[in-house]
Image (spheres, helix red, strand yellow):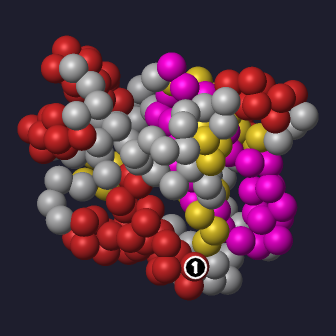
Amino acid sequence: MPGRLIYLMGPSGSGKDSLIEAARQPLAQLGCDVVRRVITRSAESVGEDACGVSAEEFERMERQGAFALCWRANNLVYGIPVQIDDWLASGHNVLVNGSRAYLDQARQRYPDLLAILLTVDVDVLRQRLIGRGRESPAQIEARLKRSSLFSAGDGSVLGGAVFLLDNSAGLSVTLEGFLRLLKAQGISATPGRT
């Protein structure tokens, strides 16, 4: 039985990278592989464990069919390696750090994907973005406004069923909620069993 794609989304600063890192070992016990994205930014950039490549290298890889999914956002290009298709076919569940704006396209390729939106209280998110020191106050406010559009909660902006997971409290609380949600949705060491 094939595995299932877990498509984790959330605004910048919501804590996706921290959650993914904290969940890595429990996910392995559930037969879930965590994908390392390819991004057109320096490998020295602070943030997620990603493979940084030049824009030219990314374009070459894209032309050669290296990506199952790819999108452009925030002046960067992101790619999910095509190897996830083999992992899914062999029964492994696969977690990807996805894009909210690309969810509809991802659903077209993986209709059974499990979409999870990591949400954060706006004041908590503002403080996290300020603490990172990557953006100006105006850029932070623009990110917060964009985030509110995707967190409407009715699924209309996101185009279908999306599970909301609040990460305003401590990471351990979010991790417990994340693992409960996965198990409730049938993500287990043996696909098809809860």
Picture residue at 83% right of the left edge, 29% below the top: 60
Q: Could you say whether the residue bearing mark 1 is in a helix, strand or loop?
A: helix
The magenta stretch is 75-102
The residue beneath circle 1 is 28
Task: Using residue 131 as the reference point, say whether residue 44 is left or right of it.
Answer: right
- On whether residue 95 falls in the magenta region, the answer is yes
Relative to 118, residue 40 above or below: above
Task: Report the front residue among 131 and 146.
Answer: 131
Picture residue at 43% right of the left edge, 71% below the top: 23
The number of numbered badges drawn on the structure is: 1
Which image quarter is the N terminus in?
bottom right
Task: Report the front residue among 75 and 109.
Answer: 75
| Residue 167 occupies quadrant | bottom left
Relative to 187, residue 86 above or below: above
Residue 165 percent location from the top left of the image = 31, 55
Residue 34 in view here: yes
Which image quarter is the C terminus in?
bottom right
Residue 42 percent location from the top left of the image = 54, 37
Query: Looking at this rendering, what residue extends furthest in the front direction?
Result: 44
Picture residue at 33% right of the left edge, 70% below the top: 175
| Residue 90 occupies quadrant | bottom right
- On whether residue 28 falls in the magenta region, the answer is no
Residue 192 percent location from the top left of the image = 67, 76
Task: Report the front residue among 135 and 166.
Answer: 135
Query: Looking at this rendering, what residue extends furthest in the top direction?
Result: 138
Task: Report the front residue among 181 and 77.
Answer: 77
Which amino acid type is shown beneath numbered disc 1?
A: Ala
Relative to 31, residue 114 above or below: above
